[in-house]
């Protein structure tokens, strides 16, 4: 009869923590552009619409915040550093070799 153990983060393939990448933080330039967009949009909409009711002010604030976040995210995709560069020329033999198969996870041996 074999002893069974419950899977842990070290044994279970879907609970691996080494493959999780942290989210990048916005750069100071992205924060400045996003904040500036929120301020300018809010001021322009308040001056041009003459909104005075609470729902109108909340709508203007939400619109300006959404636009500021959009500008920050668009700027992030444009200024993101490129991924790792591929070698300029690879030998012909290296290009034709298949990728090695992944090794199965090691499991502790059960005591009998």
Image (spheres, rainbow, N blue to C red):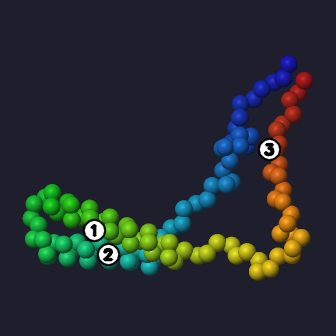
Locate residue 19 relative to residue 93 in the image: left or right. left
Residue 48 percent coordinates (x, y): 14, 75
Residue 38 percent coordinates (x, y): 29, 72
Q: Secondary structure at mark 2?
A: helix
Locate residue 106 relative to residue 25 in the image: left or right. right
Which residue is label 1 attached to? 64
Label 3 or label 2, whichever comes before in sequence order? 2
Residue 51 percent coordinates (x, y): 11, 67
Q: Residues within 10 Å of mark 3 (few under 14, many from 20)?
A: few
Number of the label disc, if any, that sits on residue 3: none
Cβ–Cβ under 8 Å for marks 1 and 2? yes
Question: Looking at the figure, which quarter contains the N terminus?
Answer: top right
Q: Secondary structure at mark 1?
A: helix
Residue 87 percent coordinates (x, y): 77, 77
Number of disc labels? 3
Where on the picture, by quarter, is residue 67?
bottom left
Which residue is label 2 attached to? 37
Locate residue 14 relative to residue 80 in the image: left or right. right
Q: CA distance from mark 3 to mark 2?
A: 49 Å
Cβ–Cβ under 8 Å for marks 1 and 3? no
Residue in the image at 71% along x and 40% along y = 12
Q: Residues within 10 Å of mark 1 (few under 14, many from 20)?
A: many
Where on the picture, by quarter, is residue 100?
bottom right
Q: Residues within 10 Å of mark 2 (few under 14, many from 20)?
A: many
Number of the label disc, if any, that sits on residue 105: 3
Q: CA distance from mark 1 to mark 2?
A: 7 Å
Residue in the image at 77% along x and 26% along y = 4
Question: Looking at the figure, which quarter contains the C terminus?
Answer: top right
Q: CA distance from mark 1 to mark 3?
A: 50 Å
Cβ–Cβ under 8 Å for marks 3 and 2? no
Label 1 or label 2, whichever comes before in sequence order? 2
Residue in the image at 73% along x and 75% along y = 86
């Amino acid at each position: 009869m074999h002893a069974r153990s419950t899977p842990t983060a070290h044994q279970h393939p879907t609970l691996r923590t080494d493959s999780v990448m942290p989210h990048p933080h916005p750069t100071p330039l992205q924060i400045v552009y996003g904040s500036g967009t929120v301020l300018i949009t809010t001021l322009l909409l308040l001056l041009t619409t003459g909104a005075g009711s609470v729902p109108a002010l909340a709508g203007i604030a939400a619109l300006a915040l959404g636009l500021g976040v959009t500008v920050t995210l668009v700027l992030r995709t444009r200024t993101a550093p490129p991924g790792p560069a591929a070698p300029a020329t690879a030998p012909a033999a290296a290009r034709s070799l298949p990728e090695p198969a992944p090794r199965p996870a090691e499991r502790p041996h059960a005591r009998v």
